[in-house]
Amino acid sequence: MKKVLVLNGPNLNLLGQREPAQYGTDTLATVETLCKEAGERLGVEVECRQSNHEGVLIDWIHEAGREMAAGNMLGVVMNPGAFTHTSIALHDAIKGASVTLIELHISNVHARESFRHHSYISPVARGIIVGLGVKGYALAIDALVQVSQAT
Ligand code: CA2
C-alpha cells in the first residue's frame, strides 16, 4: 500500500485550543484521525507528523522525496503554517526533492491580513486547498491520490 505523508508546521499543535473563529474547534489529534480515515477509504497508508521547526520539516520533505523515488509514497499534504509566508528554504526543499505536494490551509488566507496572501510554497505545490476548514485535509489526500493516478 502506497503512503501519503501529512505534515503540519508551526503552532498547529495548538489547534482547537485557541482562535476557534479562524481554525475551528477540532484538535490536531482529531485532524490526524480524519486523515487516517480518509486514507482507509482511499486505500493509502497515511502518516501524520507535526513540527514547530523549519529544519525538521525540511528533513521530512527530503525523506519524502527518497520514498517517492523508491516508489513507496504518492506524496505529501502539507500545512506549512506561517512558514508558508516566509520560507524560501521549504520552497527549495520541495523543489529540490521533487516532491508532489498539496499545500493546505484551514483558513482562507486570502480573506485575512495581506502578509498571508503570499506563499513561497504555492509555486512548487501540485495543488492548493484553502479555506475549507479541517475537512480540507481529507480533500487534499483525495486530490493527491487522484493526481498520482493521472500521472
Ligand atoms: O489557515 C491555515 O491553515 C494557516 O496555515 C495557519 C497558520 C497561519 O500562519 C497561516 O497563515 C494559515 C497558523 C497556524 C497556527 O494555528 C493555531 C491554531 C490555534 C491557536 C493558535 C495557532
Image (cartoon, rainbow, N blue to C red):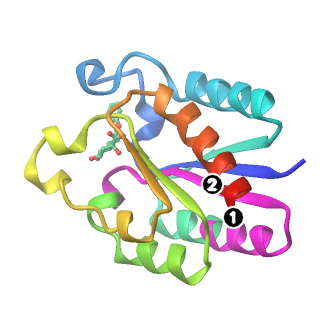
Which quadrant of the figure shows ligand 1?
A: top left
The residue nearer to you, when weighing 111 against 116, is: 111
Judge left or right: residue 23 versus residue 101: left
Q: Residue at x 25, y 26 (%)?
A: 22
Type of amino acid under label 1: Thr
Q: Residue furthest right?
A: 1
Judge left or right: residue 82 versus residue 12: left
Pointer 2 residue: 147
Q: Residue at x 37, y 29 (%)?
A: 132
Local SS, label 1: loop
Q: Residue furthest bottom?
A: 96
Q: Residue furthest top?
A: 25
Q: CA distance from mark 1 to mark 2?
A: 6 Å
Label number found at residue 110: none
Residue 18 drawn above or below residue 75: above
Pointer 1 residue: 151
Quadrant of the image occupied by residue 113: top left
Q: Residue at x 35, y 19 (%)?
A: 24
The percent coordinates of residue 32 (x first, y second) are 63, 31
Judge left or right: residue 134 versus residue 116: right
Q: Residue at x 23, y 43 (%)?
A: 109
Magenta-highlighted residues: 61-83
Q: Is mark 1 within 8 Å of ligand 1?
A: no
| Residue contact at pointers 1 and 2, CB within 8 angstroms | yes
The percent coordinates of residue 43 (x first, y second) are 83, 36
The residue nearer to you, when weighing 10 against 103, is: 103
Type of amino acid under label 2: Val
Residue 13 drawn above or below residue 86: above
* The C terminus lies in quadrant: bottom right
Residue 110 drawn above or below residue 73: above
Mark 2 crowd level (few <14, some 14–19, many ≥20, 10 Å Cα) = few
User: Per the image, is 135 magenta?
Assistant: no
